[in-house]
């Protein structure tokens, strides 16, 4: 009887919480590497934890987790303040500032590298850090995956996100789950022209691919369900950070190592369908000096430590359940699984092969993309030596 009442009480509390809106914010910055650009020193993680733990006590955030991917300090937070909250962004800024102080004390490499402005003005966008955030109505059970990439750019997510939400050869649910059969909508940004477009899959699949195949210009920002899906139409089911560091800094200061949040299951890609695209180590831009194409290697956290030629680029996937109170139940280090050994092996084969091209394209990025790197500085001195042919 007592147990029954407790069960009833519990299900009531859960029922009350289902339907509440929670925001998940993943904010990251490179505020110093150890050594070089390879990984984050534990003291920086500790400092960020201290700052966020204080904020959790005073109620700014519900829960948090601090980790790293390569040289990027990663803050994962839940709260009720919505996206672009000055309070939450201010908190991330404070954590990065304090971690920078520690990086300076320890003499870490590139201390404060991604904090491109001195003053915080309500939002970290445009100041250096990268952000992926979504405000969602919690489902009865809310499984999510946060992705953390190092030594690459936001467009690295185009192929895997497309495959999760639009490719029936990846996601069986698109064919055999009635809740997914109508497909999804993609919000695609033209990051050069600062414009966006919403496109519908499968109807406009070829047009979507015509854009996002150009991964350095068109990037998937969000994915939305369609009318009739159990998730409200205006709530994202995936979101990717799309900040462009060179635009803020005016010169190359590091690639915009991106993060993403993806919701899974119950009419969305199953966890295994969310991870499946990473079994193929596709080529992404980034790697050494942000100037090379190379394979994206899915790794557990312990291997999120790019070493060979500052790479190859890495992808970490952390799995979470969001509790009815908005707590982060996790992380589960999802690529820590022999099922991804082959992808890692393949990535290493590709690494060997493509590295032998040295400074030649297509290992080195095409000229248009080198514009945003340190190459123009080298070419400058040759400018006056060119003369017309005939
Ligand atoms: C890539 C990256 C590194 C550096 C490289 C040179 O995003 O961070 O590959 O570009 O180690 O770094 P500097 O110029 O700082 O010596
Ligand atoms: Mg760095
Ligand atoms: Mg990095």
Image (cartoon, grey):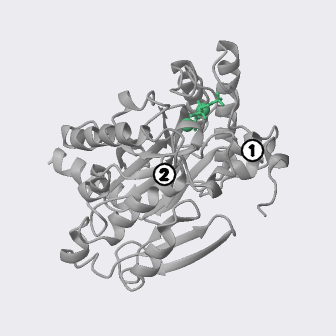
Task: Give the crowd class for mark 1: few <14, some 14-19, many >=20 residues within 10 Å.
Answer: few
> Which labelled disc corresponds to residue 379?
1
Q: Quadrant of the C terminus?
A: bottom right
Farthest residue, direction front? 390
Q: Quadrant of residue 106?
A: top right
Can residue 46 be seen here? The reply is yes
Q: Nearer the viewer, residue 41 or 11?
A: 41
Disc 1 + disc 2, Cβ < 8 Å: no
Task: Give me the residue at 59% from left, 38% from top.
Answer: 289
Among all residues in the image, which is located at the extreme left? Answer: 1
Q: Residue furthest bottom?
A: 203
Residue 331 visible, this orientation = no
Say whether residue 354 is left or right of residue 51. left
Residue 278: percent from left, percent from top:
32, 51
Instruction: Please give the name of the residue rendered at 39% of the width and 71% of the height, measured from the top-left corner.
Output: 231
Question: Which quadrant contains ligand 1?
Answer: top right
- Residue sticking out furthest to the top: 106
- Identify which residue is drawn at 36% across, 81% down: 202
Label 2: state its secondary structure. Answer: loop
Compared with 202, 100 (above or below) is above
Q: Is residue 379 above or below residue 141?
A: above
Question: Residue 220: horizontal and vertical position, in percent?
Answer: 50, 65
In the rendered image of this protein, does residue 285 appear above or below residue 307? below
Q: Which residue is mark 2?
A: 362
User: Which residue sits at x=14%, y=48%?
Assistant: 1
Which mark, by number, is residue 19? none
Q: Position of residue 139 (x, y in %)?
A: 35, 62
Which residue occupies the foreground of this view, 122 or 297? 297
Tell me: 197 left or right of 307. right
């Amino acid at each position: 009887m007592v147990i029954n009442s407790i069960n009833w009480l519990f299900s009531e509390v859960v029922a009350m919480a289902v339907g509440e809106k929670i925001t998940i914010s993943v904010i990251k910055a490179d505020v110093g590497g150890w050594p070089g650009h390879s990984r984050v020193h534990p003291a920086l993680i500790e400092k960020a934890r201290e700052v966020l733990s204080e904020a959790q006590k005073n109620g700014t955030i519900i829960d948090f987790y601090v980790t790293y991917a390569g040289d990027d300090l990663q803050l994962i937070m839940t709260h009720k303040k919505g996206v672009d909250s000055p309070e939450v962004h201010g908190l991330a800024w404070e954590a990065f500032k304090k971690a920078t102080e520690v990086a300076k004390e320890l003499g870490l490499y590139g201390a404060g590298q991604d904090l491109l402005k001195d003053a915080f003005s309500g939002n970290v966008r445009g100041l250096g850090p990268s952000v992926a955030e979504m405000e969602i109505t919690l489902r009865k059970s809310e499984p999510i995956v946060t992705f953390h990439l190092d030594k690459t750019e936001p467009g690295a997510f185009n192929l895997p996100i497309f495959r999760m939400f639009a490719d029936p050869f990846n996601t069986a649910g698109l064919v055999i789950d009635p809740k997914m059969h109508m497909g999804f909508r993609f919000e695609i940004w033209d990051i050069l022209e600062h414009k966006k477009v919403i496109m519908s899959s499968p109807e406009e699949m070829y047009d979507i691919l015509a854009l996002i195949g150009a991964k350095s210009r068109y990037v998937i920002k969000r994915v939305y369900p369609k009318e009739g899906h159990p998730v409200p139409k205006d709530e994202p089911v995936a979101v990717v950070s799309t900040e462009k560091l060179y635009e803020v800094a005016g010169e190359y200061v590091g690639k915009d190592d991106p993060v993403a949040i993806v919701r899974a299951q119950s009419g969305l890609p199953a966890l295994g369908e969310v991870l499946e695209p990473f079994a193929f180590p596709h080529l992404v831009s980034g790697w050494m000096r942000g100037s090379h194409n190379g394979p994206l290697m899915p790794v557990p956290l312990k291997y999120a430590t790019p070493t060979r030629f500052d790479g190859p680029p890495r992808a970490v996937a952390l799995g979470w359940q969001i509790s009815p109170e908005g707590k982060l139940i996790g992380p589960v280090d999802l690529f820590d699984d022999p099922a991804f050994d082959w992808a890692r092996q393949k990535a290493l084969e590709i690494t060997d092969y493509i590295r032998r091209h040295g400074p030649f394209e297509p290992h080195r990025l095409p000229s248009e993309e080198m514009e945003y790197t340190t190459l123009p500085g080298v070419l400058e001195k040759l400018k006056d030596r060119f003369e017309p042919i005939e």
